[in-house]
Image (cartoon, rainbow, N blue to C red):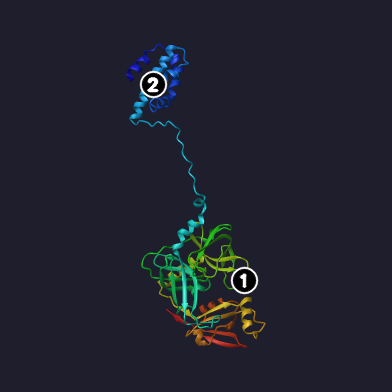
Amino acid sequence: MALKFMNFMFKCRIPKTYTIIKVTPLCCNYIHISSKLFLSNANLSKTMNEYFRHDHNHESRNFKFYLYSTISILSYFLYKQNYFTINILPEVKAATHQSIRNQYNFIADVVELAKSAVVCIEINDTHRLDFFAWSGAPSMTNGSGFIIEEDGLILTNAHVVIGHPQSAIQIKLADGTVYPGKVEDIDVKTDLASIRIKPKQKLSILKLGNSNDLRPGEWVIAMGSPLTLSNTVTAGIVSSAYRTSSELQLYGKDMHYIQTDASITFGNSGGPLINLDGEVVGINSMKVAQAGISFAIPIEYAKVFLNRNKQRQSSKNVNKRYLGLTMLTLNHEILRELRYRNPYIPKDITEGAVVWKVVIGSPAHKSGLMPGDIVIDINGNRVKSSNAIYQALEKASILNMKVYRGNGYLELSVYPEDTE
């Protein structure tokens, strides 16, 4: 039937110009016509006559009728053979709505990548006299750290673990697993320390980034375990990537710090300061409470510290000096507390270091040092901060100290011990 219609179409006495002008435009909507005819089960002849009833040229109307009939039949045949798909109604696609929450929560994305490598460091020491707690209760401190090697190497601050060589250090991972830790190396000048644990499987690690290309205004994230609350997160921007120690009145350090408004609270020390690429650019160190600003040690110092540690291990020269005490830099708040307890402290004592904790049986304990002693002088050098004793420890085998206790001055000699 289709072939007969096509033969009739070519036998029609229609001028060529009419065929070009009239026929060709009529062929453009054949799919639309065929879909209405066949998918709606309409009568072909009736529909065609109705469609072309305004055409008064009998010969032209017949041509159009048979042309559309042929095209419709062929279209229906092709449709049945799945050569194309006909949609009677226009296809409407719902607009895809991308969640703003998922699109712009970039801090949450970084935390998700980094949280498994952040650890809580807990130190429970029953062999310690505490100046601020004479009740005999165990002395417990905590801090933060992060894993940098799959076999269990952890980086943290030196002040988190220093003075605890005989204490049990517990490392709590993000999943709650607890491992005993051992201090591997300490650098008191840069306030960095490394701890080693022996995990049963490979651990998640954080990649060390580059703190030299940090820019003011760049987003950073501080993670840690303040007050033993694992995976505490604060965020802020970098205010200064190069804040010198002299600006912070940290004399004798000769280093610089990263200043940020990301809050670093008590116990957050040693945790990572991370950029938006998930790389560690600093180690959380300290906070100026009243100003609401915090400081972190640039990761470049940690890289030097770790390389030196590897060199020491390769040369089997890992001996460390041990005193067995913890000291605090004397400031106005501590001095006010000391004078409240002892009103006889001279007014000319405005700087120094106060002995905070002493390990029983340690060299410091044997020398006669007690919690609450104010160290004024070490080996003839005026003490301006607690770092002075650690610097003297690296250079001298005997530490001759001038301290103030009670209502007078004492001179004590401390003999540090070498530990393997």
Instruction: Point out the frontmost of discs 1 and 2.
Output: 2
Q: Where is residue 215 shown, x and y percent of the image? A: 57, 58
In front: 35, or 368? 35
Helix, strand, or loop for circle 1?
Answer: loop
What's the amino acid at mark 1?
Answer: Gln
The residue at 46%/58% (across/down) is 112
Q: Residues within 10 Å of mark 2 (few under 14, many from 20)?
A: some
**Pointer 1 or 2: first along the chain:** 2
Q: Is residue 238 visible?
A: yes
Q: Quadrant of the N terminus?
A: top left
Q: Mark 1 highlights which residue?
A: 249
- Residue 361 falls left or right of residue 355: left
CA gap, disc 1 and disc 2: 97 Å
- Residue 342 falls left or right of residue 198: right
Residue 44 numbered mark, or none: 2
Placement of 76 over or under 383, stated as above or below: above
Quarter of the rendering containing residue 113: bottom left
Q: Quadrant of the C terminus?
A: bottom left
What's the amino acid at mark 2?
Answer: Leu
Determine whether label 1 and label 2 are within 8 Å by CB: no
The residue at 54%/77% (across/down) is 391
Q: Where is residue 162 shown, x and y percent of the image? A: 49, 76
In front: 282, or 139? 139
Q: Is residue 183 visible?
A: no
In front: 83, or 288? 83
